[in-house]
Image (cartoon, rainbow, N blue to C red):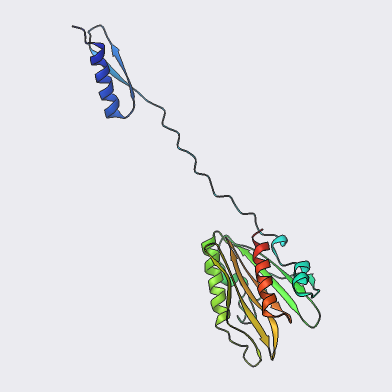
Amino acid sequence: MKRSTATIAAVTAAVVGIGGGAAAALLNDDDNVEVVPVTASPAATPATPSPTATDAPSEENLVRERMYFDVTGHAFDRTTLGQSARLGPCTGDSTFADVLPVQGVTRIGTRLTGSDNRAVTHQLAQALNAQEARVAANEIVSLVDECAAISGGDFGYGDPVTVIDEPDRKVVYFPAFDTDRVYGGYVVLQVGPRVGVVDISDTVPADQVEQIAKEAAGIADD
């Protein structure tokens, strides 16, 4: 007796259920049912989008003469800054590179100079991710916070002031003092994978240092 179409369908359905793929039921001359698996094309796995790579930092991400003048009214000129520039006056001979991850880092820097040895140094680096940048920023804040004053002199920093503290952005500045006058300050910033410092050696008050800190964070993130 020939097996009914319903029986064939049932067998086929069972095979589909067991094998997880499609199957074809074929009849031969002996009325036997042979179930031939048909290899189905695997479902396409949606491609995981790769994170958009941030362009390497450029001079456009650094403090500029015009911005500094707009905030302080002090005219400065841009000069070159070597890769071995010190991290800051409170960190001895340490360089910016000393507090950065060993691999995958791009560094740039600039220096604005004025009369009477006034200067603004901005160093910026791009790490592999925001976590590495935040670790470096926190380390710099700790190093500067440990230095209350320069030994043998009257220069020093006040307490750190946190301007921004978000998951992907952090901006902190220290107001600086030289003898009995305000003398700029020191800014530490982290925006995404970028970390930077702005060393302001100029007779500008804390509110202007804070404004420069905000501006520097904004252009570093451009």
Residue 53 x, y percent position in the rendering: 59, 52
- Examine the rendered structure and indicate whether residue 213 appears above or below residue 131: below
Residue at 53% from the left image edge and 73% from the top image edge: 139
Q: Is residue 79 left or right of residue 218?
A: right
Residue 85 x, y percent position in the rendering: 67, 74
Residue 211 x, y percent position in the rendering: 68, 71
**Any part of residue 168 in sight:** yes
Q: In front here: 36 or 185?
A: 185
Residue 117 sits in which quadrant? bottom right
Q: In front here: 56 or 212?
A: 212
Q: Residue furthest bottom?
A: 152
Residue 219 sits in which quadrant? bottom right
Q: Is residue 57 left or right of residue 127?
A: right
Q: In front here: 152 or 63?
A: 63
Total number of numbered labels?
A: 0
Residue at 42% from the left image edge and 28% from the top image edge: 41
| Quadrant where the image shows the C terminus | bottom right
| Quadrant where the image shows the N terminus | top left
Residue 135 x, y percent position in the rendering: 52, 68
- Examine the rendered structure and indicate whether residue 158 appears above or below residue 37: below
- Examine the rendered structure and indicate whether residue 114 appears above or below residue 63: below
Q: Residue furthest left?
A: 1
**Any part of residue 84 in sight:** no
Residue 208 sits in which quadrant? bottom right
